[in-house]
Image (spheres, grey):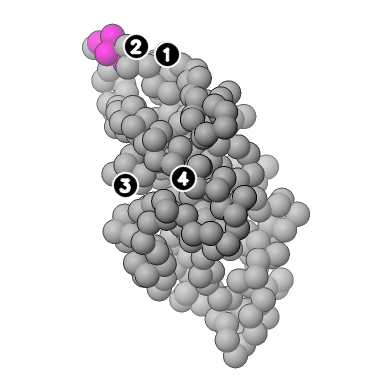
Amino acid sequence: MTQISSLKPLSANRHRNTYWQRARGYFHAAEHHLVPVTSRELPRAVGSFPLVITHQKSGPILQALLGVESGRSAFVDSHGCWRGGYVPAYLRAYPFYLVETAQDKHVVAVDESSAALQADAYIGQALFTADDKPTPQLQKVIDFLGQVARNRALTDRACRSLDEAGVLEPWPLELDIGNQPWRFSGLYRVSEKQLNALEGAALHALRDTGALGVAYAQLLSTGQKSRLEAFARARENEQRLPESESVFTEPDLEERIDWDSLDFDEGYEG
């Protein structure tokens, strides 16, 4: 997981002579077992991994469950390749992130420990122009992160609406990984019973905030439990036999990504 100490606000003064090569794999995502997702991602996310709701200081948020334990993703294999067909937007702009400041604002930050920033002028791309403006490539990343942030705000509002409507319940999720079951705590799901019991104004309020779409997507995504179990078992096997290839690994996603496009909509096309 990206350490707080390695995330620094992006600025021309600090990063004028920094050169960037896009990461060609997903080693940076290997330690993320939970990542935020937005309602804009749901058409692809719902069929890729279980969606859960967790309670943070800022309120309930929608997240993708990518692993069975903190610090290890089941969706990244030992070679840094992504399993599955969809990569959450949160992970796609690496080594850049949008970080919330103490003033409830967001700034673009960069992981200065990333190998993607160790290039020179001969093999990398500059982050800033001679007049200290973001290069076109960097501006695309900034625009992408802005889109993600705006959709994240809408998704957070939808999750708050679900919480206020009383339709969230603890999810005592248990996965069969082989040797012993994995039990989770702190996860929440939508109660289908409570959702179906809503009428009138309460139901309209959920519709108006986009919460109904989030609710149905979360319920549908629970069917991806078996996919997560399979990937987690494969990851366990790789840990024991690091040179072996997992039988669960899907075709290399790297061959199907347009690395020159960071448009949010393009992310759905994978």
* Image disc number at residue 231: 4
Which residue: 39% across, 40% down? Answer: 227
Say what secondary structure mark 3 lies in: helix
Give the foreground label among 1 and 4. 4
Q: Quadrant of residue 181?
A: top right
Q: Amino acid at mark 1?
A: Gly
Residue picked out by circle 2: 194
First of labels 4, 2 by sequence position: 2
Sequence-wise, which precedes: disc 3 or disc 4? 3
Tell me the chief SS of the magenta region. helix
- Above or below, 178 against 84 in this view is above
N-term mark: 1 or 4? 1
Sequence-wise, the earlier of marks 2 and 3 is: 3
Vertical relation: 149 (above or below) 65: below
Q: Secondary structure at mark 2?
A: helix
The residue segment tinted magenta is: 194-199
Looking at the picture, which amino acid does disc 2 mark? Gln
Quarter placement of the C terminus: bottom left
Name the spot of residue 15 as percent of width and height, x first.
67, 73
Mark closer to the observer (1, 3): 3
What is the spatial separation of the Cα atoms under label 1 and label 3, in whole angstroms?
27 Å
Seen as rendered, the residue at the extreme right is: 5
Is label 4 or label 2 in front?
4
- Using the numbered discs, state the Cα–Cα distance from disc 3 to disc 4 in whole angstroms: 18 Å
- Cα–Cα gap, marks 2 and 3: 26 Å
Left or right: 120 with respect to 146? right
The label nearer to you, 2 versus 3, is: 3
Determine which of the numbered discs, if any, sits on residue 44 in the image: 3
Q: Is residue 259 visible?
A: yes
In this view, the residue in front, 102 or 227, is 227
Q: Earlier in the sequence, mark 2 or mark 1?
A: 1
